[in-house]
Every structure is written in structure tokens, then in C-alpha cells.
Image (cartoon, rainbow, N blue to C red):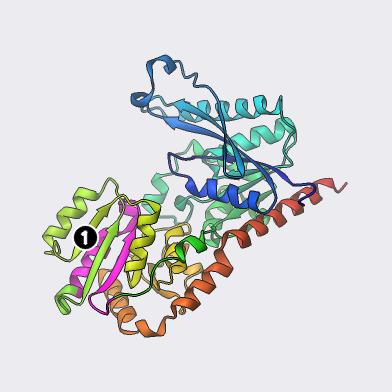
Amino acid sequence: MKNNPLRIWVIPSWYPPNGGSFFREHSQALAKEGADVTVLAGIYLSLKKTPLKYWNYKYPVQIRRKGEIKEVIRKLPIIPFVEKPNYFRWINLVTNMVKTHLESNPPPDILQVHSSIWGGTAAERISKQYNIPYVLTEHRSRFVYNTPEARKMFKSWYYPYLKSAFEQASRIVTVSPSLQDKIADISPEATDKMLSIPNMVDTTFFGEAREEKPQQPFRFFSLAHLEPVKGFDILLKAFAILEKNEPGKFDLVIGGDGSQMQQLLNLRKQLGLEEKVRFTGHLKRKEIRNQMGNAHAFVLPSRFEAFGVVYIEAMASGLPVIASRAGGPETFITPQTGLITEPESPEKLANAMKSLQENYSQYDTGKIKKITSSSFGRSAIARKYLDLYREVLNHKKQP
């Protein structure tokens, strides 16, 4: 492949600085394995952050190198409170970026699309126009459960576009099997195209987390956007049970920021945990690694979770993890690496946290790291994707 690298153009539904750092890392991992990778990303920008000269929505295209990949970036100021028109504008932006880039570059062998909303629809349009196959990877946790919260995230006008995007994809990758039922409900014809490949993690980076920790207090670390779906209210109530039963034996550090910050601070005060639970706010990558290194275990009781990269990052740091049965985590957390508990139950979560602490010596830090690296390391996952692309292209060549 080094002599004739696969040309892959990546269409992400969102991209840094608006999240999506995983999409960049995924692209860089493919390039490291020898592929020629270009990312074409349309990035939403609020009108408040848009200079007056660009209020006509004509931001210039930026082309830059980011490590071993090329990034083609164009910003799109969004019109407030009109989701559907913004969707069509974003699709048009991305398809026009592809058209322009094809004028001076050879076409890709394949498109890698991250998330159906709305990269999948853009890829479908591009594929039909230029006869380029696409692999669609679905990441969004809203595909996991048929709960009221998840259903609210799907508006009625989404469905025909999603159905068509799934049907036209050459293959559909889900980051865990838990997403596949919802996709099959939307597009039954796509069922046979689905397979699961987990998200990749920079296991080397997180494997550098230090391991020496005091025996007490036993520290749990948690990290996510502070949003209702992540279940931090359940975590605080569970920790209050631990503190009531065994005061001073545990402490808890919660990383991240989000819309629930003040509500969770109020709950912490209400539960009398101000001295025992610390909120760090937003953490940079190295700060996350440091927090992992200072913790004994990781806990996050999400209400639903497509996959949960943060659990893998914790495991790569050698930490045993606790998750709720939320869709993704139960597909990769084993008795060797942690515990699964039921969602929406502070009592059961408290029991799991206590059980993990009491049996902490049974968790082998080195073994947890090794399991994580072999299953979720960048190189291992990138090779799985490259094998899948070759399969798609070989199938395309057959008469």
C-alpha cells in the first residue's frame, strides 16, 4: 500500500474547534498506516463570532497540513433558530468544497463519513454525482435507545434523509452494536451492510498516566460534558450514599463543563458534598491524563451512550471503570476491566463503587492497559478500516 496508497477523503459532520477531535485523530491514524488522507470539513460558526465582512456567508476556504493529513476547511455562519435551512446550507457548502477540490486534485478512492447527521447526506449526494463509494460511521448516542430523550433528538423530517444516506452507503460502521437496531428501524434495507468497529484511542498517550496512589481516600474520577444524558445527578446521589455509610473513605473529582454545571453544584451543596466532590471545569488533554493518573478508578453512569471513548481512555490509563448499562459500554467492559451497573439507580451505583474499592487488588493495571491497547489502539483500528475500504473497492470492481 505504501507504493500505491489509498486516497481517502473524510467528510466529518463536525470538526475542531467544534468538537470532533476524534475525527482528526482517526484520519491521522489512517495516514500513519500509509493512506493518503484529506479531510473536507464545513464548520458551523455563530453570527456573533462572524466578522461583518463575512455576513454574506462567504468565508474563504483554508487548506492546511495537520500532521500527516491535509485539511480543507470552510466556515459557515449559521442562521439562528432555523435548523433545516442550516442543514441544506451545510450540505451545499460541503458538496461545493468537494467539487472545487476535484478540479485540481485526483478523485479519492473512497469517502469516509463520520455520522449520518449530516455528513451522510452530503456523501450520498457526492457519491451519486462522482461515483465514489462511501463508508458511513455512526457515532451519535441518540441511535442507542428508544427512550423519550433519544426520540426527541429525531425530528420527523430527518427520517427520509437518514434512510437514503444509510441505503446508499457501501458499508455502515457502528462504534458499538447497540446503535444498529435504530439504524435498521430507519433503513431496513441497510441491515446487511452494518458491522461494528470500536472507536480508537491513543493508548500510548494515556498509558503514561502515573500509577502510584495513596490507599485512602479512594478516588473516583469522572469526565464528560455536564449534560443530563451523562447521569451526573445519579453519580452525586450515589456518592452521598457512600459518604453517609463510610465517611472520609472516598473522594470524587468530576471533569468537564456544560449546561448542568450550576444545577450539579446546587445538588452537591444540597447533599452536603462540597468538601468531598470537586468539579474541575474544562480539562485539556494532558490535564485529563493527569487526573486519570491520580485516580484509583473511573466512573460515569450515562443514561445512554453510543460507545464511550472516555471509558477506553481510563482503561488505557490502567484504571478499572464503572458504567451503567447504557448501550455501548457493556459491549467492551469485562470483569477484568470493571463493572456494569443498572442506569437510574444511585443505590446500585453506590454498591458497584463500594464493590470495586473492596476488590481493587483484583484489577491488574498492566493487564487492563494491554487489553485496551490490543483492542482499541490507533494502529489496530486503522488497519480494520483500511481492510474494510479494500473490501468495498474490490466489490466495486467486480462485474
Q: Secondary structure at mark 1?
A: strand
Apparent side of residue 386 relative to residue 65 in the rendered image (left or right): right
Q: Tell me: residue 206, above or below residue 104.
A: below
Apparent side of residue 245 relative to residue 293 in the rendered image (left or right): left
State the extent of the magenta-drawn residues as a range. Answer: 214-242
**Residue lying furthest right in this view?**
399
Q: Is residue 380 visible?
A: yes
Apparent side of residue 59 relative to residue 275 in the rendered image (left or right): right
Q: Tell me: residue 62, above or below residue 347.
A: above
- Residue drawn at x 64%, y 37% as measured from the top left: 124
Q: To which quarter of the image does residue 272 belong?
A: bottom left
- Residue drawn at x 54%, y 60% as measured from the top left: 176
Residue in the foreground of this view, choosing between 300 and 365: 365
Q: Reply yes or no: does residue 225 show up in magenta.
A: yes
Residue in the foreground of this view, choosing between 336 and 122: 336
Spot occupied by residue 291 in the image (x, y as percentages of width and height)? 33, 62
